[in-house]
Image (tube, rainbow, N blue to C red):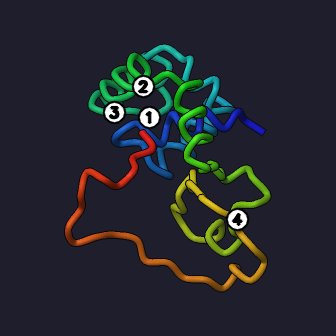
Amino acid sequence: MDDVRYWVAFSCVQGIGPVRVRALLDHFGSLEAAWHADLPKLAQAGLDRRVLTQLGATRASLDLDAQMDRLSRLGVRAITWEDTDYPERLRQINASPPVLYVKGELKPDDEWAVAVVGTRSPTSDAPSFC
């Protein structure tokens, strides 16, 4: 499996979602290779100038090891499309999230669970994983 920290890293890049993650995987074979690719090669994979700018800024500012340590300290794990723990029903929908941040455990009974995520009054107290 591709190193999960690169999945986490790309989830922190504004403008990169499921469609672009799939394009990067198809083009580079792994998100690690995409993370280390130069900008012209990333453009060949279909990233536009705006996303390339965001990616460059994120690569310059994000310490991948520190990010993974932070998730660990918070008791959060990242589950990717490549993980066997990724919910099968979610995997089957079009444009499912490439990374799920999970605190706790997913149980077999959760297969039929439904979640609604969002808030009408966001606060700065909510943890951000990026």
Residue 119 picture location, percent across and down: 28, 70
* Image position of 27 with respect to 82: above or below: above
Residue 23 picture location, percent across and down: 54, 41
Camera-near label (4 vs 2) is 4
Camera-near label (4 vs 1) is 4
Q: Amino acid at mark 2?
A: Ala
Mark 2 surroundings: few (<14), some (14-19) or many (≥20) residues within 10 A: some
* Image position of 127 with respect to 35: above or below: below
- SS of the residue under disc 4: loop
User: Residue at point 70% right, 65% down?
Assistant: 105
User: Residue at point 50% right, 52% down?
Assistant: 18
Residue placed under numbered mark 3 in the picture: 51
User: Residue at point 50% right, 19% down?
Assistant: 41
Residue placed under numbered mark 2 in the picture: 43
- Tell me if label 2 and label 1 are in contact, CB under 8 Å: yes
Q: Say whether disc 4 or disc 1 marks the residue closer to the N-terminus.
A: 1
The quadrant holding residue 7 is top right
Q: Amino acid at mark 3?
A: Val
